[in-house]
Structure formats: C-alpha cells, structure tokens
C-alpha cells in the first residue's frame, strides 16, 4: 500500500515555497548570526552610501551658493584680457637695441651725410670733416626728420649697428634710429642743434665697446609704458567695481 503523498513533492522533487525562501535569507540565519563579518560589511555599505549622499548634497548647495554669488571663488572670476594687461616686455629694449657692440675703425665705415636743416652746404662741410676723421663718405644730400630740433639722427640696419656706434662716438648727442635695410651703411641726418665744431677729433674719440644711444626713443617708450600701465590699472579697477555692483544687485535668498 502506497504511503500518503507529500503535497510539497512533485514527481520526486521538492517544491521550494515562499516560507522556504524567507527562512533561507532571514537575518536570523544562525550562519549570519554567528558571523560578525556579515554585519560589519552591511555597516560599511551603509556608511559609504551615507557619505556619498552627504557629498552630493554639499556639492549641490555649493553650486547654488556660487551661482547666486553668495560665495565668490577668485579663481573662477573673469581675468583681464591680455590686451588690458600691463606690458611685460622691456620698453627700453624695444625702442633701442641693447646689445654691446664692438667699435669699428672709421676707415671701415661708409656714412651718408644728409642735411635736414635750412643751412645750405652743411652736409658737404660735415662730409669733409668726417672724411678727415677717416670715414668713407657715401651719399651727400638732403633729407627730412620728423623732429628736426635735435643734433641729428644716426640711421642703420641691424648689420650696420656697430658702425653706427662709431659714428655716434664722433658726433655726440645724436639719436640712433633703427631701419630695415640689408646694407651696413650708416646715414647721418643733420638736425638743427648740430654744430660742425662738435665733431670729435680722432684722438679724443672713445674706442671702447658699448651700446647705441637712443635717448628720445627710450623716453617716449617709457612714457608710453607708464600710460599703458595706468590705463590697465584703471580698466581693472573699473571691472572690479562693475563686478561688485552686479553682486550687490543679486537678491539675497539665503534666508528664504
């Protein structure tokens, strides 16, 4: 005689019920109760989730405060544009070459003598004196100066700078003017403050290495740099005032 059939068996296999599942995953499982690592792991997971939630909330609050300008972060503030920034280059070097040049003997220098004054024959007379000093004379004629109220201008390209130094040693008080040219010849353009008697004798001419003299250009460059720095400072101050005014217009919603 067959025994009574168990309703939880089906064709020899035991059916897993909801109660079985609950019993299998219950926190009261003796294996879990006796294993403290299980509870430590659950505690750690809870702490991590709590920290992530706190960080997310803090980030949202900070973003709101920055957006409403209740908190100002200097690194995020707009910076002055390069055009408004104070110049970083040396104005003197830009206006006048600063390299130390080697003195060149007058016999190796070809100089063009040009007259920018109303005194007739001054260029020819100057050319004769310079030739006696040992210079080779090129062109003799007339020219124009933007500012004729100077002793004169000594003009050359980059390759003729050392020779221009020699000319300045014989005609003191001149202004060096750089010009784009491939030849190493030098122009001496006579100004109104020039005096033929001021040309230095050969024995008194300084023959040491040195720098070109550009007093007018250097003074103008320094004045321009000073004005540019003042303008940049004024622009930065105005921008700061504008940002402060915009910040004051923002509604205070901190206590709402």
Image (cartoon, rainbow, N blue to C red):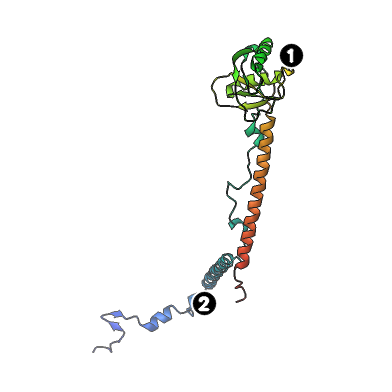
Q: Residue furthest left?
A: 1
Q: Position of residue 196 (x, y in %)?
A: 71, 17
- Other-residue count near label 2 (Cα within 10 Å), few / some / many at <14 / 14–19 / ≥20: few
Q: Mark 2 points at which residue?
A: 33
Q: Where is residue 35 in the image (x, y as percent from the top left)?
A: 52, 73
Quadrant, the N terminus: bottom left
The circle drawn on residue 113 is none
Quadrant, the C terminus: bottom right
Residue 186 visible somewhere in the drawing: yes
Kindly identify the residue that appears in the image at 66 percent across and 32 percent down.
217
Residue 70 visible somewhere in the drawing: no
The circle drawn on residue 201 is 1
Q: Is residue 35 above or below residue 146?
A: below
Q: What secondary structure is found at the residue carrying circle 2? A: helix
Residue nearest the viewer, comparing 64 with 39? 64
Q: Is residue 20 above or below residue 245?
A: below
Give how far apart the Cα atoms at labels 1 and 2 are.
112 Å
Kindly identify the residue that appears in the image at 42 percent across and 81 percent down.
22
Residue nearest the viewer, comparing 216 with 10? 216
- Other-residue count near label 1 (Cα within 10 Å), few / some / many at <14 / 14–19 / ≥20: some
Q: Position of residue 40 (x, y in %)?
A: 55, 71
Q: For residue 89, which quarter of the picture? A: top right
Residue nearest the viewer, comparing 66 with 169? 169
Q: Which of marks 1 and 2 is in front?
A: 1
Q: For residue 127, which quarter of the picture? A: top right
Q: What secondary structure is found at the residue carrying circle 1? A: loop
Q: Position of residue 51 (x, y in %)?
A: 56, 68
Kindly identify the residue that appears in the image at 60 percent across and 65 percent down.
69
Residue nearest the viewer, comparing 195 with 173? 195
Q: Is residue 119 left or right of residue 9?
A: right
């Amino acid at each position: 005689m067959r025994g009574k059939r168990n309703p939880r068996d089906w064709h020899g296999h035991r059916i897993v019920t909801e109660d079985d599942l609950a019993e299998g995953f219950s926190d009261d499982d003796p294996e879990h109760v006796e294993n403290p690592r299980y509870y430590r792991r659950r505690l750690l997971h809870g702490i991590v989730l709590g920290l992530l939630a706190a960080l997310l909330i803090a980030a949202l609050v900070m973003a709101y405060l920055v957006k409403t300008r209740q908190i100002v972060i200097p690194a995020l503030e707009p910076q002055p544009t390069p055009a408004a920034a104070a110049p970083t280059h040396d104005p003197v070097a830009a206006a006048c070459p600063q390299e130390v040049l080697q003195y060149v003997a007058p016999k190796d220098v070809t100089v063009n003598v040009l007259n920018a004054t109303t005194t007739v024959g001054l260029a020819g007379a100057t050319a004769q004196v310079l030739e006696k000093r040992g210079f080779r004379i090129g062109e003799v004629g007339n020219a124009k100066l933007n500012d004729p109220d100077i002793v004169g201008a000594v003009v050359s390209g980059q390759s003729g700078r050392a020779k221009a130094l020699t000319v300045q040693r014989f005609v003191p008080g001149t202004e060096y003017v750089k010009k784009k040219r491939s030849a190493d010849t030098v122009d001496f353009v006579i100004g109104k403050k020039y005096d033929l008697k001021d040309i230095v004798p050969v024995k008194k001419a300084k023959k040491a290495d040195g720098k070109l003299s550009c007093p007018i250009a250097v003074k103008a460059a320094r004045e321009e740099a000073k004005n540019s720095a003042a303008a940049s400072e004024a622009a930065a101050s105005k921008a700061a005032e504008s940002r402060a005014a915009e910040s004051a217009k923002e509604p205070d919603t901190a206590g709402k």
